[in-house]
Image (cartoon, rainbow, N blue to C red):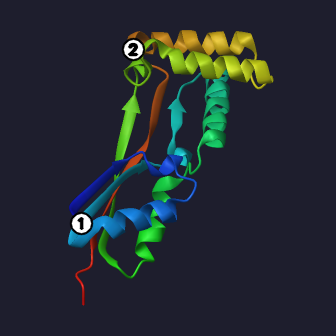
């Protein structure tokens, strides 16, 4: 058994978050603390005055949500933990983030470019709009937009002591 368990961005990839949570709770000793750090892709937005950029961002978000097993992991995990009888002190702490330089998340914007190429290939966005989006994202640190915002959630809990 463990005194604590910490998982970050695990549940968004888990098709069965209940099973993953069950396993984390199982390995904790009574009184042990668990922490999940997860997002909810429904909270992401892009601050921009450029309608083309906003449209491409929405397409990238929709594509990402479509690939994730559990894109709303934070709210799902929170509800699942609240419903359990073997844990207590379930706390949800939101942390807002704002990213102006996307290269801090995606060095060289390699993943972004791959995703845009897939969207162009699928006909979801035009090549011209994808290229415009890339140019705006690359210039963001210098010109101040677009900015990606969203929330990460820290969900902590304690495994109840044996009765």
For disc 1, the neighbor class at 10 Å (few under 14, some 14 to 19, many from 20) is: few
Give whichever of discs 1 and 2 has the lower sequence position: 1
Whole-percent x and y of residue 116?
A: 65, 19
In the displayed image of the protein, which residue is found farthest to the front? 1
Residue contact between numbered discs 1 and 2, judged by CB atoms under 8 Å:
no
Whole-percent x and y of residue 61?
A: 61, 35
Whole-percent x and y of residue 58?
A: 64, 33
The tag on residue 141 is 2
For disc 2, the neighbor class at 10 Å (few under 14, some 14 to 19, many from 20) is: some
Q: Nearer the viewer, mark 1 or mark 2?
A: 1
Task: Report the front residue among 65 and 139.
Answer: 65
27 vs 122, left or right, is left
Q: Is residue 32 above or below residue 37?
A: below
How far apart marks 1 and 2 lie (CA) works out to 46 Å
The tag on residue 29 is none
The tag on residue 1 is 1
Q: Residue at x 50, y 65 (%)?
A: 18
Counting the numbered discs, the total is: 2
155 vs 147, left or right, is left
Whole-percent x and y of residue 82?
A: 41, 74
Q: Residue at x 54, y 45 (%)?
A: 41
Query: Could you say whether the residue bearing mark 2 is in a helix, strand or loop?
Result: helix
Q: Residue at x 41, y 16 (%)?
A: 107
**Which quadrant would the C terminus be assigned to in this image?**
bottom left
Q: Is residue 93 above or below residue 139?
A: below
Q: Residue at x 66, y 38 (%)?
A: 62
Query: Could you say whether the residue bearing mark 1 is in a helix, strand or loop?
Result: loop
């Amino acid at each position: 058994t463990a005194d604590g368990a910490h998982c970050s961005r695990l549940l968004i990839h888990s098709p069965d978050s209940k099973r993953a949570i069950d396993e984390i709770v199982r390995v904790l000793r009574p009184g042990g603390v668990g922490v999940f750090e997860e997002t909810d892709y429904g909270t992401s937005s892009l601050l921009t005055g450029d309608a083309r950029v906003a449209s491409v961002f929405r397409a990238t978000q929709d594509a990402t949500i479509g690939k994730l097993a559990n894109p709303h992991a934070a709210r799902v995990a929170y509800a699942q933990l609240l419903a359990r009888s073997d844990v207590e002190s379930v706390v949800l702490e939101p942390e807002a983030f704002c990213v102006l330089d996307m290269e801090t998340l995606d060095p060289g914007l390699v993943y972004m470019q791959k995703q845009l190429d897939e969207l162009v290939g699928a006909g979801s966005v035009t090549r011209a709009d994808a290229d415009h989006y890339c140019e705006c994202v690359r210039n963001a640190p210098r010109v101040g937009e677009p900015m990606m915002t969203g929330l990460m959630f820290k969900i902590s809990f304690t495994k109840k002591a044996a009765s």
